[in-house]
Image (cartoon, rainbow, N blue to C red):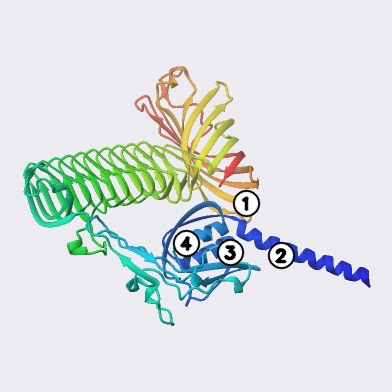
């Protein structure tokens, strides 16, 4: 009796501890998340599907329509959820095999002012001692531990996310707004920086209309500024800035608050004959030579020479020679020579080179493309990537986790063949060598392209369609004369394991040759490699280019990845 009770006790203890381990395991599993302006509800659904976790919550208390941004790599799920809910009034608890979400903590609303005209409002909180608490997104052990914090809302009354049912103590907070540091003027006129209507205090004033006949220095612009040669602004430009040579802004460039208010739904404009430079840019920058953004870009950059953004970008870059973004860019880069993105990019088009971390779209260049993970297409002379979702199309395509095989085989023409096949499954390159053992030994050196179609993973079969051209070296003068074997292949491939497969299939062969056979009288033209021909246009010495056509067969073995 006691022995049975002991066994049962040990059994339930093991079940309990294994349940705790499983509970902790699913919260500690590493996750990779990348959300840009995504609904919180969609993000939760995506996490649930990809990582086999269940969320339990009510849409009345969790802001599922809130747009969120999050990017994490190989981070524990619990830490990722901390970041996900950081800007939301949500706390969570891992209970059993579910993650329970509940509205709990207050969210301090950020009051954003674009530019330096209106200083930020500082919100100072006052709370009674008995109401002091600390809200956190750390996991709680039980539902009862989840704090009920709806009645605590901080910030200005007009930006409260939700009014509590009970009356708010108005002594909970007060607002202190310091006097602005920069005074405002309707207009100013300057001949040069130290000679104008705001002389002596120009860098302390923000102007709605600023006219600099040669050039000027001002504190800020909220409207329009025009300079014959240059404009220099200590703080922000909100509106339009035009100069004959250059614009230099110490702060940000964005839309005018006179038109847009604080909504930031429009864009500013910065135009210069040579260069534009600013910190953060929400504008259209057009420079005859250079555009420089020391922070982030939202908008368009067009320059005769190049564009550079130190942080991330959203929009379009068009440079005569180059475009460079320090972080990721959501948009398009177009240049005459090269585009560089320090992180992710959507579309890169360059005359010579494109470089990015991840691509979600396309890389197109005249010479070279490089990316780690390509969710789309690479098109260039040489393409290099770790993974490609659609295809890398070019003369040479190197995909680390792509279609990479070494082949040994034979055909009716080449008695022994060796080939390298590399690239992506939808488009790969072939470099092959062949040899024919006949009265005279003939060699073949070839290049081709192919695609794998009708891939059936369930039964390990696929079909390959390929086109390969080989120069056949069979006589002394075949090095400098056309002697081309063109093969159009259809082969079936059976993969017995992940790294080994066999193939076989028919070929259509076309031999085009300018070789001269001087041992005959009269001279004849053409290659001696084909064993037979179903078509041959070589009839007499008047025909100097021989074309033969025949059907053939090939088979062999392959080593390496075929997907």
Residue situated in front as seen by the camera: 416 or 41 = 41
Residue 137, image x, y percentages: 53, 63
Residue beneath disc 3: 139
Residue beneath disc 1: 460
Marking on residue 278: none
Looking at the image, tell me whether mark 2 or mark 3 is earlier in sequence order.
2
Residue beneath disc 2: 19
Q: Would residue 495 be visible to someone looking at this image?
A: yes
Element assignment for label 4: loop
Residue situated in front as seen by the camera: 407 or 128 = 128
Circle 1 Cα neighbour tier, 10 Å, few/some/many (<14 / 14–19 / ≥20): some
Residue 503's place in the image compared with 5, above or below, is: above
Element assignment for label 3: loop
Q: CA distance from mark 3 to mark 4?
A: 13 Å
Q: CA distance from mark 4 to mark 1?
A: 47 Å
Residue 536, image x, y percentages: 44, 34
Residue beneath disc 4: 86
Q: Nearer the observer, disc 3 or disc 1?
A: 3
Q: Residue at x 27, y 39 (%)?
A: 336
Looking at the image, tell me whether mark 4 or mark 1 is earlier in sequence order.
4
Q: CA distance from mark 2 to mark 1?
A: 39 Å
Q: CA distance from mark 3 to mark 1?
A: 46 Å
Q: Would residue 468 be visible to someone looking at this image?
A: no
Residue 449, image x, y percentages: 46, 40
Looking at the image, tell me whether mark 3 or mark 4 is earlier in sequence order.
4
Residue situated in front as seen by the camera: 57 or 313 = 57
Looking at the image, tell me whether mark 4 or mark 2 is earlier in sequence order.
2
Q: Nearer the observer, disc 2 or disc 3?
A: 3
Q: Nearer the observer, disc 4 or disc 2?
A: 4
Looking at the image, tell me whether mark 3 or mark 1 is earlier in sequence order.
3
Circle 2 Cα neighbour tier, 10 Å, few/some/many (<14 / 14–19 / ≥20): some
């Amino acid at each position: 009796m006691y022995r049975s009770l002991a066994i049962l006790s040990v059994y339930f203890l093991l079940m309990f501890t294994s349940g705790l381990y499983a509970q902790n395991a699913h919260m500690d599993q590493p996750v990779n998340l990348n959300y840009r302006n995504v609904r919180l509800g969609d993000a939760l659904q995506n996490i649930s599907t990809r990582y086999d976790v269940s969320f339990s919550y009510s849409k009345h208390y969790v802001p599922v329509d809130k747009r969120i941004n999050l990017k994490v790599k190989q981070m524990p799920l619990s830490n990722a959820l901390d970041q996900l809910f950081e800007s939301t009034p949500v706390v969570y608890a891992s209970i059993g095999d579910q993650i329970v979400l509940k509205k709990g903590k207050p969210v301090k609303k950020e009051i954003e002012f674009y530019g330096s005209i209106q200083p930020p409002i500082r919100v100072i909180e006052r709370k009674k001692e008995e109401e002091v608490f600390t809200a956190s997104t750390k996991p709680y052990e039980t539902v009862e531990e989840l704090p009920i914090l709806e009645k605590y809302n901080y910030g200005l009354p007009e930006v409260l996310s939700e009014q509590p049912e009970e009356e708010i103590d108005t002594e909970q907070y007060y607002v202190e707004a310091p006097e602005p540091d920069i005074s405002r003027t309707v207009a100013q006129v300057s001949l040069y920086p130290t000679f104008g209507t705001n002389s002596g205090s120009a860098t302390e004033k923000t102007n709605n209309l600023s006219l600099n006949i040669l050039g000027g220095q001002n504190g800020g612009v909220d409207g329009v500024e025009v300079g014959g040669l240059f404009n220099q602004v200590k703080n922000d430009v909100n509106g339009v800035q035009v100069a004959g040579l250059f614009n230099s802004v110490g702060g940000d460039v964005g839309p005018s608050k006179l038109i847009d208010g604080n909504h930031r739904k429009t864009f500013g404009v910065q135009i210069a004959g040579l260069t534009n430079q600013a910190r953060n840019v929400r504008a259209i920058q057009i420079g005859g030579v250079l555009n420089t953004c020391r922070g982030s870009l939202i908008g368009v950059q067009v320059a005769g020479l190049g564009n550079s953004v130190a942080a991330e970008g959203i929009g379009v870059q068009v440079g005569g020679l180059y475009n460079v973004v320090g972080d990721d860019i959501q948009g398009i880069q177009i240049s005459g020579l090269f585009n560089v993105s320090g992180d992710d990019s959507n579309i890169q088009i360059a005359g010579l080179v494109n470089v990015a971390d991840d691509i979600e779209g396309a890389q197109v260049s005249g010479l070279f493309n490089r990316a780690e993970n390509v969710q789309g297409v690479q098109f260039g002379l040489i393409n290099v990537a770790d993974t490609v979702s659609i295809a890398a199309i070019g003369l040479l395509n190197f995909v680390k986790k792509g279609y990479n095989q070494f082949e040994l085989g034979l055909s009716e023409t080449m008695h022994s063949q060796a080939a390298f096949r590399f690239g992506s499954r939808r488009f790969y390159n072939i470099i092959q060598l062949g040899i024919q053992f006949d009265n005279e030994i003939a060699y073949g050196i070839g290049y081709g392209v192919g695609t794998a179609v009708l891939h059936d993973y369930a039964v390990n079969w696929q079909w390959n369609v390929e086109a390969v051209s080989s120069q056949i070296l069979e006589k002394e003068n075949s090095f400098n004369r056309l002697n081309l074997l063109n093969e159009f292949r259809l082969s079936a491939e059976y993969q017995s394991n992940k790294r080994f497969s066999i193939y076989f299939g028919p070929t259509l062969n076309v031999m085009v040759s300018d070789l001269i056979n001087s041992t005959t009288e009269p001279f004849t033209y053409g290659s001696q490699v084909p064993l037979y021909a179903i078509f041959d246009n070589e009839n007499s010495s008047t025909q100097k280019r021989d074309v033969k056509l025949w059907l053939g067969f090939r088979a062999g073995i392959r080593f390496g990845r075929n997907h």
